[in-house]
Each structure stands twice: as structure tokens, then as C-alpha cells.
Image: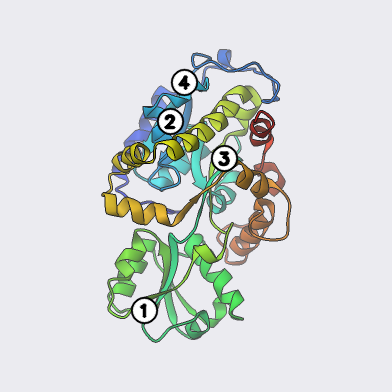
Amino acid sequence: MKRRNFLPLLAAFFCSLLIAIGCTPDASQTGAPTNGAETAPATATDGRPVRLGYSNWAGWWPWAIAEEEGLFEANGANVELIWFDGYLESMQALAAGQLDANSQTLNDTISFVDDSANGMVVVLVNDNSAGNDKIIGVEDIETMADFEGRTVALEEGVVGDFLMNLALQDAGLSRDDVQIQNLETGAAAAAFAAGQVEGFAGWVPFWETALTRPGSQVIVTSEAYPGAIPDLLVTSQTLIDERPEQVQALINTWFDVLAFMEENPEEAAAIMARRAGVSAEEFETYTAGTRMFTLDDNLEAFSNGEDMVHMPYAAQVMTDFMVEVGFIPTAPDLEAIFDDQFVQAFAQGQ
């Protein structure tokens, strides 16, 4: 999986190596009660630090605010915040037990959960992609129906492919009605820009490359499919079982971060742009296509329903798609990957 893997991977490899060597869990510091809503408030010195990974996506940049503004400590969260230049490496680190929590998408969580050492559980929705994932066509493609019989470059099984599948279905077509050229997302964008294919599906910044082709145009974006691409805080089941008060502290911290962003927009933007290493113009582009999730949005996302806004439904649709295209061999236990107790506990305290 290479979802949102913007920058070189070498630094991420060394980061993962350091985590594996320096952050072995201490069993003597575990054994907390199992209900995060009923435990005593955490303190920032309880146990070893919770190792939280994040990488270069606009919905996850706000974790840098928590670190810089002391919001982890203020909420009793004992956190070692770890930046990954490579998103793939952050998921591998969580699956291997080298992280306690990570920032990742729903489809990637479904892909990795069966291979994870300590389980993977979604405890918070940070944001939804609301335009940062796009389907692009050549100048004579104006609707999704015009893709019939055309060649589209994308990375099979990841979110661009999933978005393409949803949009084709709405146009009365299927993936079988287009010619898929399976390429890594950066290579797919380059192939489209070079005139080798007639369509592209992928995420920022790769669609910026695709749009350099003269006459190219955006046909559909993730804004048309709320809930299809949620970005999440995912923890290990072990962290929930042994240190639920720290999971609750992470959730509390996140909502304090959102409040800080609302009250101090310029300062928050400066912190996030600095962490991401992007210009002010790039920052505006990336955040414009990202819809940050409020408490009410989270409560709705975790609830059951019959559309993509509801994560249990979205997860089933994603799983069916990934099994159908052979991206995963079998469906995991989807009920086990959602735990809203910490969001619910935060809501009850408001």
C-alpha cells in the first residue's frame, strides 16, 4: 500500500528501526482497567509514552499543534509523537507492534488488520477527504460515462481505485467497462501527464502532476462521496485493553486541538505548514480539500446507517470491493475494528 506516501522512504525506514530498538513495551507498566470512561484521569507521567505515528496528510498535521502547544500534557496524554516521511512505513510499524497508535485511512486499516500483531481499532475520525482525491480525464471526457472503453491509470486497490469504482457505478458502468492500467500512483499521474493514458485517479499532490497535461480536467472528486475516504486515529487493541485512560486522553487532546485551530487560525496554520514543509499556497490547496470532523461528525460516523457517511456501512462496501479486485484475500472481522467508547465518553462530558 502506498496511500499518501508523499516523501522519500529512507528516513521513514530509519525512524521505524529506531522505534523497534528503543520503544519495547514494559509489561510492568500495563494492566489498567478496561473501560476508559470510568478510569481516573490520566497524568502525563503514567507509564511509558504512547507511540503515536502520523504522516503527510492535511487531516493529520494538527497533531503537531498538540505537541507544540502542550495539549498532550494538558490532557494527561503521555505521548511520543513520531513523524513518518512514508505513510506506508507508519502502517507497517503499527501492524508490527512498533507503534501504539497511528494516523491512517479506513481502507488501509481493513487491509492491514488481519496481519497486525496487537490488533487495529478505529477510535476517532480526524477528517474526510473532500476534494483532495480526484478523477481526471482528457479534454473530450466530460462525464464518468465518457470513460467507457478508455484507459485509466491508477493504483489498484487503494482509494483512487475505490473512488473510480463508486463514480463508475453511479454512471451505470463498472471497472470492466474501462481499461485499468495498474501503476503506482505517482507513476500513474506521470503516465497521464505524458499522454500515455486517457484518465487518472489519485490524491494530492499527484493530481497536480496529472493536471499539467494540456486540456485535462477534473471529472469527479471525493467531495461528491462523503464518507468514502475517512482519515482516522487507529490504536492497537492492546493499548485499549491495557491503557484505556491514555486512549481517552488522546481523544480529549484532539478535540482541544480543533478548538485551538478555531480560536487561533493563523498560528495553527503556521504550525501545520511548518510541520508539513509546504508553502502557504500549497497549505491552502491541501486543507481546502480536507473536511475536519467535529464531535457530532464523529458520533454520526460511528453509528449504523445505509450510506457511506456511516463507517460500518462504508467499511463493508470497501471490503467487498477489495476482495472483489483481489487486493485482500478475505474479509476481516469488521465489527472488531470500531470502538466509539472514547468519543462517546468525551461527548458525555460536554
Q: Residue at x 61, y 57 (%)?
A: 329
Badge 1 element: loop
Q: Is residue 250 left or right of residue 37?
A: left
The residue pinned by badge 4 equals: 73
The residue drawn where x is 65% and y is 43% is 337
Q: Label 4 amino acid? A: Glu
Query: Mark 3 or 1 closer to N-term?
Result: 3
Q: Nearer the viewer, mark 3 or mark 4?
A: 4
Give x and y (percent) for residue 348.
Answer: 69, 31
- Disc 2 designates what residue? 66
Q: Earlier in the sequence, mark 3 or mark 4?
A: 4
The CA span between labels 1 and 4 is: 51 Å
94 sits to left or right of 284: right
Which residue is painted at 58% across and 79% down in the image?
A: 171
The label shown at residue 197 is 1
Crowdedness near tag 4: few (<14), some (14–19) or many (≥20) residues, C-alpha within 10 Å: some
Relative placement, left or right, of 348 versus 127 is right
The residue carrying pointer 2 sits among few (fewer than 14), some (14 to 19) or many (20 or more) residues within 10 Å by Cα, namely many
Q: Which residue is mark 3?
A: 116
Q: Residues within 10 Å of mark 3 (few under 14, many from 20)?
A: some
Q: Position of residue 159 (x, y in %)?
A: 50, 60
